[in-house]
Amino acid sequence: MTEEKDYQKILASVQKPVEGEAGKTGSWSTIKPKINLDKCIVAKMEKNVCHFCWLYCPEPIITRTIPPRILYDYCKGCGICVEVCPHKAIEMVEESEL
Ligand code: SF4
Ligand code: SF4
């Protein structure tokens, strides 16, 4: 099995977003991550070449799509997506800026 197939297998095993016992957690934080599509490599290349934000979000509420999208109803504002983005394409902003 190639490294690429191993990688795809790992990605496929990651759980999909579901509503947990805490319900919608989007109100837990007033700052939220915002993806700058001019910097996001997936959006720029229109290919599934990164998606670290999707992989590491603990909820998980970032879609593995082109471009990636954040489902704010469940975002706790932890900022992990900001830290793992290799292209510095995500920043935390006030909700009013979304
Ligand atoms: S701030 Fe945390 S919960 Fe919200 S999208 Fe980023 S990693 Fe996920
Ligand atoms: S980690 Fe950053 S560059 Fe990679 S898909 Fe997410 S926003 Fe785009």
Image: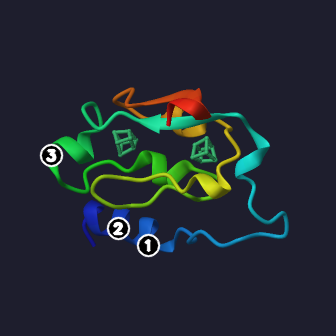
Residue underneath mark 1: 12
Q: Is residue 66 above or below residue 39?
A: below
Residue underneath mark 2: 8
Where is the N terminus found, in terms of image quarters? bottom left
Ligand 2's image quarter is: top left
Q: Nearer the viewer, residue 37 or 42?
A: 37
Q: In this view, which residue lies farthest toward the front?
A: 96
Residue 20 relative to residue 59: left or right = right
Instruction: Measure how far apart labels 3 and 2 are at the Cα level.
Output: 19 Å
Q: Which residue occupies 84% across, 70% down?
A: 21
Secondary element under disc 1, as helix, strand or loop, is: helix
Q: Quadrant of residue 80?
A: top right
First in sequence: mark 3 or mark 2? Answer: 2
Q: Amino acid at mark 2?
A: Gln
Q: Quadrant of residue 95?
A: top right
Picture coordinates of residue 64, whole percent (x, y): 39, 61
Choose mark 3 or mark 2, whichever is in front: 3
Residue 3 relative to residue 64: left or right = left
Does the beta carbon at disc 3 come under 8 Å from ligand 2?
no
Picture coordinates of residue 67, whole percent (x, y): 30, 52
Residue underneath mark 3: 45
Q: Quadrant of residue 28?
A: top right
Q: Is residue 22 above or below residue 96?
A: below
Q: Which residue occupies 66% across, 56% down?
A: 74
